[in-house]
Amino acid sequence: MISSLPTCQSGSRLTTLSRLAPGVKGYAILKGGAYYIPIIEAEQEGNGDVGRFLDALDPAVTFKIPCVINARLAMMLVRRGFRRVVEHTDEGDPVEVWQRGILTR
């Protein structure tokens, strides 16, 4: 189970993606007890690494994937019990977020 991820500070300049799991790059921000993962990228698309990464996320930890624009990723999240909600930025703007974990129960 994956219960923690390498994190960046919110608002920091992104220079490189971190290795989140074998075959998966991206970055995460820990905010309010939840991991936000704005970028998830397969090193080789189509071999199942992103699906295995999502499957390995600990259900006792809250993970949130904001601004999903890839329909394939959205369906992967649905199959794994993520639900779509709307959150608001610090400036009050609405943002679509897919979330799963302890805060969603």
Image (cartoon, helix red, strand yellow):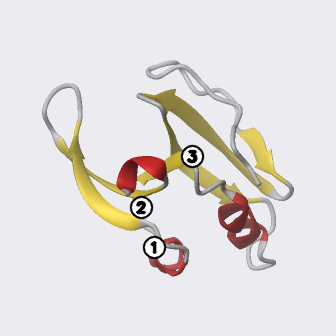
- Residue tagged by mark 2? 68
Q: Quadrant of residue 16?
A: top right
From the viewer's side, name the closer residue of 21 and 17. 21
Closer mark to the observer between disc 3 and disc 2:
3
Q: In the image, residue 82 lies at what x, y percent?
A: 45, 67
| Disc 2 element | loop
Q: CA distance from mark 3 to mark 2?
A: 20 Å
Q: Residue furthest left?
A: 92
Residue type highlighted by circle 1? Ala
Q: Position of residue 68 (x, y in %)?
A: 41, 61
CB of mark 3 within 8 Å of CB of mark 2? no
Crowd band around label 1 with a 10 angstrom C-alpha radius: few (<14), some (14–19), many (20+): some
Label 1: which secondary element: helix
Classify 10 Å Cα crowding around label 3: few (below 14), some (14-19), many (20 and above).
Answer: some
Q: Which residue is mark 1?
A: 74
Which amino acid, by three-letter code, is at mark 2? Val
- Labels 1 & 2 near each other (Cβ < 8 A): yes
Q: Earlier in the sequence, mark 3 or mark 1?
A: 3
Callout 3 amino acid: Val
Residue 19 in the image: state x and y as whole percent: 79, 43
Q: Secondary structure at mark 3?
A: loop
Question: Callout 2 environment at 10 Å: few (<14), some (14 to 19), or many (20+)?
Answer: some
Q: CA distance from mark 1 to mark 2?
A: 7 Å
Q: Does residue 59 lie above or below 80 as drawn?
A: above
Specify which label sits upstream in the sequence, 1 or 2.
2
The answer to whether residue 12 is left or right of residue 27 is: left
Give the label on residue 61, or none: 3
Q: CA distance from mark 3 to mark 1?
A: 20 Å
Left or right placement of residue 10 versus residue 20 in this view:
left
3 and 1 marks in contact (CB < 8 Å)? no
Left or right of 91: which side holds 82?
Answer: right
47 to 9, vertically: above or below: below
